[in-house]
Image: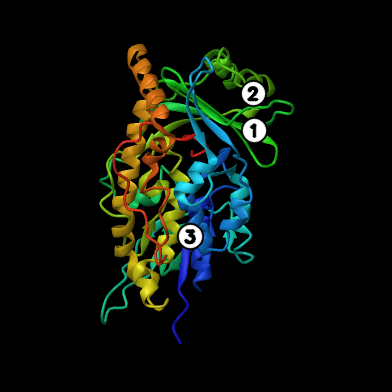
């Protein structure tokens, strides 16, 4: 009888929990070590595109999340005056990519994932770090297990999944010479609040060096986000709601209504960082990096959490494992994991940087040219605006008999509401 593999997941966010559930379903004994005192995530909402939803299908969660979709009818891109630059259709996006776009609170997704793990699999208030990445060994060589340190002692594991975020200690341990994340040039604000009696079309609005988005959630609340080009580390002299009023208070409806309903404590602010120089690999020894730990990107394509889900599913079900009928230990397929994920996520991250340069333009003339180009492109055909997501939203998990999406290429000129909740 084959020995049951043991995996330790560092980080109880979306990527870490998805990996834990996927590994658990493959018969791996999994423990999740989360630094925070609870699994309640920092952040507001996340947009899940069809690629991530197909990944969640693998662990039996896709349809539950699709049922939470709240985007119906038209939405699109606007100017601060309220003028529509382009219209987008939920139906057109679903037809093109084979599924809906779902916007939901991060806590909702975390709860769904955690509920699929056995009791005791998640340990909170458990800060963890890689002590030894281990060695998978080879023919005639059993190798050595990986070791993870915690305040309460060390854990040994056949596989360590490092999903410890953009400032990953595991990444620094595996690749100490890598420069790490850099400031993306802008900060973001997020808020989730009730907004009864206010009707609006789901939208994102682009100004000069500033953007805003407002979207409904299935539970009746509204998710709004903003981003602005500012120096790193800046904070409002009074409170962040007041800062939003200064920056966006004269923009079109329903933005003033959102700001009027929000309280200072409702507003979250975070500077945006990304990994500009790709890592040489997403694994070393018995440790695999997942999500922002591997390829943090700006939120301008709404793909950070989506790519973390893709990572997790690919790690648990790599192609070699699928061919072998599940008999190959996961750790033996880590080179295949890097080969599958590094080119794709590098291309998507670079595209997200290019889109950030586009929608965060600060020059008056350049912004006007951008807006006119978007409006002209929209008149030429809404499908053109969706092409920036070809090769991204049409991804399928390893082993899917349908055609999987290839690595993203080209530059998106405009898209559906892009920044939504991917922080």
- State if disc 1 and disc 2 touch (CB < 8 Å): yes
Vertical position of residue 233 compared to residue 115: above or below:
above
Q: Is residue 177 left or right of residue 220?
A: left
Q: Is residue 128 visible?
A: yes
Residue tagged by mark 1? 222
What mark, if any, has residue 258 been given in the picture? 2
Outermost residue toward the front in this view: 380
Characterize the local packing of mark 3: few (<14), some (14-19) or many (20 or more) Cα atoms within 10 angstroms.
many
Q: Is residue 181 left or right of residue 72?
A: left
Residue placed at 54% from the left, 18% from the top?
82
How far, Cα to Cα, is label 2 from label 1? 8 Å
Which of the 4 image quadrants contains residue 358? Answer: top left
Residue 118, position as x, y percentages in the image: 61, 67
Please state which of residues 375 and 46 is positioned toward the viewer in this rendering: 375
Which of the 4 image quadrants contains residue 224? Answer: top right
Comparing labels 2 and 3, the label whose residue is closer to the camera: 2
Residue 306, position as x, y percentages in the image: 46, 48
Q: Is residue 124 left or right of residue 167?
A: right
Which of the two labelled residues, at mark 3 and mark 1, occupies the earlier sequence position? Answer: 3
Residue 127, position as x, y percentages in the image: 51, 52
Residue tagged by mark 3? 19
């Amino acid at each position: 009888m084959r020995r049951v593999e043991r995996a330790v997941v560092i980080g109880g966010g979306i990527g870490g929990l998805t990996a834990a559930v996927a590994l658990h379903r493959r018969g791996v004994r999994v423990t999740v070590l989360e630094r925070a005192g609870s699994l309640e995530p920092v952040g507001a909402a996340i947009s899940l595109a069809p690629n991530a939803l197909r990944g969640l299908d693998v662990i039996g969660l896709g349809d539950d999340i699709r049922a939470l979709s709240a985007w119906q009818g038209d939405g699109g891109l606007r100017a601060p005056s309220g003028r529509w630059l382009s219209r987008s259709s939920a139906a057109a996006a679903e037809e093109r990519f084979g599924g809906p776009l779902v916007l939901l609170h991060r806590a909702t997704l975390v709860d769904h994932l955690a509920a699929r793990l056995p009791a005791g699999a998640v340990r909170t208030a458990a800060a963890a770090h890689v002590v030894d990445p281990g060695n998978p060994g080879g023919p005639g060589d059993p190798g050595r297990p990986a070791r993870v340190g915690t305040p309460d002692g060390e854990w040994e594991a056949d596989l360590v999944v490092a999903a410890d975020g953009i400032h990953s200690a595991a990444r620094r341990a595996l690749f100490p010479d890598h420069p790490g994340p850099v400031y993306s040039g802008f900060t973001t604000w997020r808020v989730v609040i009730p907004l009864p009696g206010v009707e609006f079309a789901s939208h994102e609005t682009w100004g000069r060096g500033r953007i805003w988005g407002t979207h409904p959630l299935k539970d009746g609340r509204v998710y709004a986000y903003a981003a602005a080009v500012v120096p790193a580390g800046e904070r409002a002299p009074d409170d962040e709601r007041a800062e939003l009023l200064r920056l966006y208070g004269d923009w079109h409806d329903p933005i003033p209504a959102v700001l009027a309903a929000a309280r200072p404590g409702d507003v979250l602010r975070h500077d945006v960082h990304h990994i500009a120089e790709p890592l040489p690999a997403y694994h070393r020894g018995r440790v695999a990096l997942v999500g922002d730990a591997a390829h943090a990107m700006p939120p301008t394509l709404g793909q950070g959490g989506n790519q973390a889900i893709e990572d997790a599913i690919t790690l648990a079900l790599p192609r070699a494992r699928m061919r072998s009928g599940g008999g190959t230990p996961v750790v033996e397929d880590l080179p295949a994991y890097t080969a599958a994920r590094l080119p794709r996520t590098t291309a998507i991250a670079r595209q997200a940087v290019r889109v950030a340069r586009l929608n965060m333009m600060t020059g008056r003339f350049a912004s006007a040219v951008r807006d006119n180009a978007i409006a002209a492109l929209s008149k030429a055909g809404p499908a053109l605006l969706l092409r920036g997501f070809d090769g991204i939203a049409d991804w399928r998990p390893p082993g899917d008999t349908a055609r999987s999406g290839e690595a993203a290429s080209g530059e998106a000129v405009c898209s559906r509401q892009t920044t939504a909740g991917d922080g």
